[in-house]
Amino acid sequence: METGNEQKSRRIARNTLMLYVRMFFLMLVGLYTSRIVLSALGENDYGIYNVVGGVVAMFAVISGALNSAVSRFITFEMGKGSEARMNKVYSTAVTIQIILSIIVAAVAEPVGIWFIRNEMTIAPDRIPSALWVLHFSILSFVINLMSVPQMASITAHEKMSAYAYIGIMDGLLRLGVALLIVHSPFDRLVFYSALMAVAVLIVRMAYGIYCRLHFAECRYRPVFDKPLVKEMFSFAGWNFIGVTSGVLRDQGGNILVNLFFGTAMNAARGVAVQLNSAVQGFVTNFMTAVNPQITKSYASGDRDYMLSLVSKSSRMSFYLLFMIALPLLFNTEYILELWLKDVPSHSAAFVRLFLVFALSESLSNSLITAQLATGKIRNYQIIVGGLQLLNIPVAYIFLKTGAPAESTVAVSIVISQICLAARLALLKGMVGLSPKDFFLRVYLNVLTVAVCAIVIPLAITRILPYGFAGFCVSAFVCVVSAALSVLFVGCRRNERRMMMSFILNKEAE
């Protein structure tokens, strides 16, 4: 008979599998959609869409901190088993998001218009279209903001099948939008932005309908509980530092590239971000399945299971990403040529650096969830968020001295490793996590796996011909080498046994 923790692990595995079905579909659709969009819009308009979207995403610093608070509080209350409290948290969150949406729209519009007209490197005749992209991007951003309480509820209940199905619908809508661009009755860039806003609205409605039908606490009441609001904003206030640093790192780097190199380089960076997002989605989906268990375990007082899950999920996140990243790292140029009709210059270098950055960040995902679960995040956010804020000034100094555009990502990789060390030191006092154990059982483990997995592909790919046949052989060797290295070097005996048990026996609980 399975223990409670074994049942939780099996639930995580099933939810991860469901999310992977979603991810494989979205990755294939997303990559094909990007190819169509890049071809239809052209390199410069594609770059404009990416950089203007980046300007809007900068306003995530206003909402992102509160979004994390909503997810944490709903999941935490579920771990404590308080349904009435969950409804109060949900209703309060919706009220806050409504107010926040109005503030974001009121601030983002004038600031975005000023920035596009006065600071961005855009051809004068494309500024009117860029402004329309701004308007529709803000609308999409606000709609997504209103989806946060519903998505948090689905994740807290671990109903990943709904998350998967709605995600697949989202992918199909985006594909439909891409196919319609060539039939645009007016400016393609504006038409694309407008249809993307419509797609976002449809997905938002789907989340709302599902939650209302399936979760008792998702019945909105016009609640504004002052003590709860104060508690959530206190949490969000300190988390604001971390969210700000993350957004500035990603979108600020994009804007720096535009200021120094123009929209063509933004297109190269945008292609790399698109491919990296598709790949990183595998880790995101895995952590979506794991995160509720980390938070619930902390809320229920099961500290040992939480620490074990943090360590295991850090390793597994790296493994999952590495098995996909390795063939991409060895075949970047050919994959880009296969994917896109016209590959923007510098795309391959950006792709490789973003993949390395994603591997570095994958080790920190569960650590971030653990610190959010505690609710005591002031010192953590001041130190780690402060370190991440160094990305933009350091990258600016490098670019100012003549460094290439890719240096913006290289700086992020180095600072990511420094932040990992800081997280480990801080979490020792917060949740009792041992930095020494993490270094030995996780960090050295994944490094050993990576080194062992690279040896054979490094030897074989040198003699393979450039082309489809060589790519197929190289990709197969990379995946097999990575999988065997993970299974026999990275995993312990009981983990291999659990994996085989899950593969061979998928019966319901």
Image: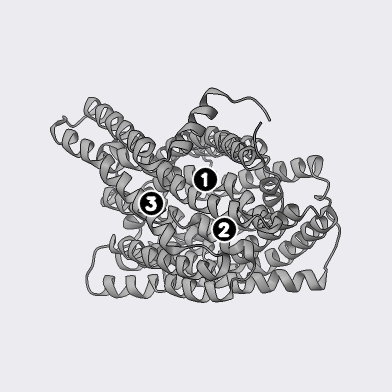
Depth check: give the residue in front, 213 or 14: 14
Which of the 4 quarters of the picture holds residue 337?
Answer: top left
Depth check: give the residue in front, 339 or 131: 339
User: Where residue 364 sits: x, y (%)?
Assistant: 46, 58
The residue carrying mark 1 is: 186
Compared to residue 298, the image places residue 118 above or below, namely below
10 Å crowding of disc 2: few (<14), some (14-19), many (20+): some
- Identify the residue at horizontal 54%, vertical 71% (top origin): 429
* C-alpha distance separating marks 3 and 2: 17 Å
What secondary structure is marked by label 1? loop
Quadrant placement of the N terminus: top right
Quadrant placement of the C terminus: top right
Q: Is residue 44 visible?
A: no
Depth check: give the residue in front, 115 or 266: 266
The residue carrying mark 2 is: 369
Q: Which mark is residue 359?
A: 3
Q: Earlier in the sequence, mark 3 or mark 1?
A: 1
User: Where residue 150 sits: x, y (%)?
Assistant: 71, 50
Compared to residue 208, the image places residue 419 above or below, namely below
10 Å crowding of disc 1: few (<14), some (14-19), many (20+): few
User: Where residue 248 sits: x, y (%)?
Assistant: 46, 68
Q: Earlier in the sequence, mark 3 or mark 2?
A: 3
Looking at the picture, which amino acid does disc 1 mark?
Phe
